[in-house]
Amino acid sequence: MEMSAKGTVLIVDDEPYILRILKMKLEHAGYGVITAINGMDAWEKIQDVNPVAVVTDINMPRMDGRDLCRMMNHHQQKHPFLTIVMTSGIDRTNRTWAEEMENTVFVEKPFSPRKILKMIDQYLLEGQAV
């Protein structure tokens, strides 16, 4: 795992293309990046690393993004970080559970990797408040 002065970002998605594109963009900007292919894999990695941000999809095998976010929400009390949830649509159900989450924002697919980078940079610049 690569450490970085800017911090580590965890990217969680079951699509290799999205993992690859976001990883390249964030590493180029100076972040350390680790990846996970599902929520269970991500949760195990969060226990070992205190990321500055987690970028996650909702629909994944083993543990989906909703369950992962709920688990991470409790972890936020000790180690706050930005959570960016990638989704193909922000419906009423997603808005409801998202309102209960700490430091969580939604990004609709398709999205620009530059937008994800800007959100993380802004979060860290503003003292970690969403």
Image: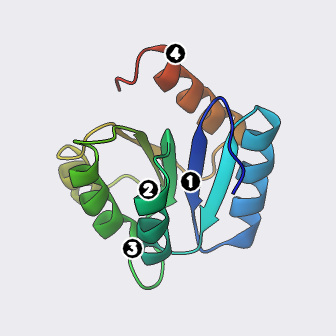
The tag earlier along the polypeptide, 3 or 2, is: 3
Element assignment for label 4: helix
Q: Amino acid at mark 4?
A: Leu
Q: Amino acid at mark 3?
A: Asp
Quadrant in the picture for residue 47: bottom left
Spatial CA span between label 4 and label 1: 19 Å
| Residue 45: percent from left, percent from top | 49, 64
Spatial CA span between label 4 and label 3: 29 Å
Quickly name the residue at label 2: 89
Quickly name the residue at label 3: 64
The colour scheme applied to this rendered structure is rainbow
Spatial CA span between label 1 and label 2: 22 Å
Quickly name the residue at label 4: 125
Q: Residues within 10 Å of mark 2 (few under 14, many from 20)?
A: few
Q: Residues within 10 Å of mark 3 (few under 14, many from 20)?
A: some
User: In screen coordinates, is 58 left or right of 68?
Assistant: right
Vertical placement of residue 52 versus 57, above or below: above
The tag earlier along the polypeptide, 4 or 3, is: 3
Quickly name the residue at label 1: 10
From the image, state whether disc 4 or disc 3 is nearer to you: 4
Spatial CA span between label 3 and label 2: 15 Å
| Residue at point 76%, 32% (across, down) | 29
